[in-house]
Amino acid sequence: MGVDSTVGPRTPASASEGSGHDRLIDCALEAFAAYGFEGATVRSIASSADVDPTLINYHFGSKLGLWRAVVDRIANQVEALVERFSQMGESSKMIDALVDEVCDNPNLAFFLIKEVSYRTDRFSYFFIALIAPLRDQMAPIIRQEINPDSPDNEKAELIHFLLMGAMVMAIVTRSFRSDSGEMNIDQRFKTDLQTLLRRLIA
């Protein structure tokens, strides 16, 4: 079944349909981040959330509906982040805020990697909800900083996606570069990542 790529009104971040509903979204994000949409199963997600699998159909209609609910929740986070970006006006501040957000929620990075790796029929919905808003806010600011006299956004968009790719890969590979084998995303890691990403624009 295809995914309607239209991003309509989303459930507000403050809205709740009960703890089972919310736990399912939490556990679904973890499962999709770890195994991808195809690898994650309805039964394992329900088991992790400690609910009956039938609640997934009840709340979301299907596994695909649950995936969309996960995207919508992240989209609410992105929307709040973009609103903060609009008050900043500097790419360095945007980079710092973005790194803080994703490092505090590393499953976002793993989920992003899984979804962009395969151009499935879910991709348009994913891109419109999560990727485009960040690009549309950051790329014009980057363009103003690197070449304010040029109307061409192509280089600025390229730099934006380089920033996003570098950030995501640094986070998802953190455990491989840690002596303990743990994610260990501490303040030093965040500060180093922010500094290095800012240099891509300097």
Image: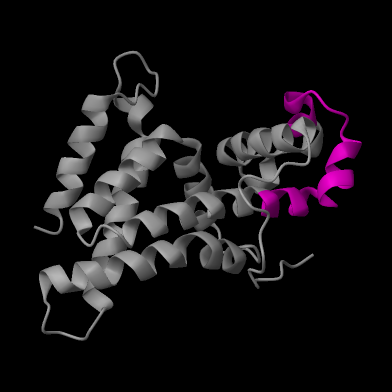
Colouring of the image: one colour
The residue lying at 63 percent from left, 44 percent from top is 14
> Up-down: is 112 above or below 91?
above
Q: Pick whichever, 26 or 77, lies toward us.
A: 77
Left or right: where 113 falls relative to 13: left
Q: Position of residue 199 (x, y in %)?
A: 12, 51
Q: Position of residue 93 (x, y in %)?
A: 22, 51
Quarter of the image holding residue 8? bottom right
Looking at the rendered image, the quarter that the N terminus falls into is: bottom right
- Residue 125 forms part of the magenta stretch: no
Looking at the rendered image, the quarter that the C terminus falls into is: bottom left
> Up-down: is 1 above or below 27?
below
The residue lying at 57 percent from left, 61 percent from top is 126
Region of the chain picked out in magenta, as a range? 44-69
Quarter of the image holding residue 82? bottom left
Query: What kind of secondary structure does the magenta stretch mostly adopt?
Result: helix
Residue, far top: 180
Left or right: where 18 falls relative to 10: right
The residue lying at 52 percent from left, 65 percent from top is 127
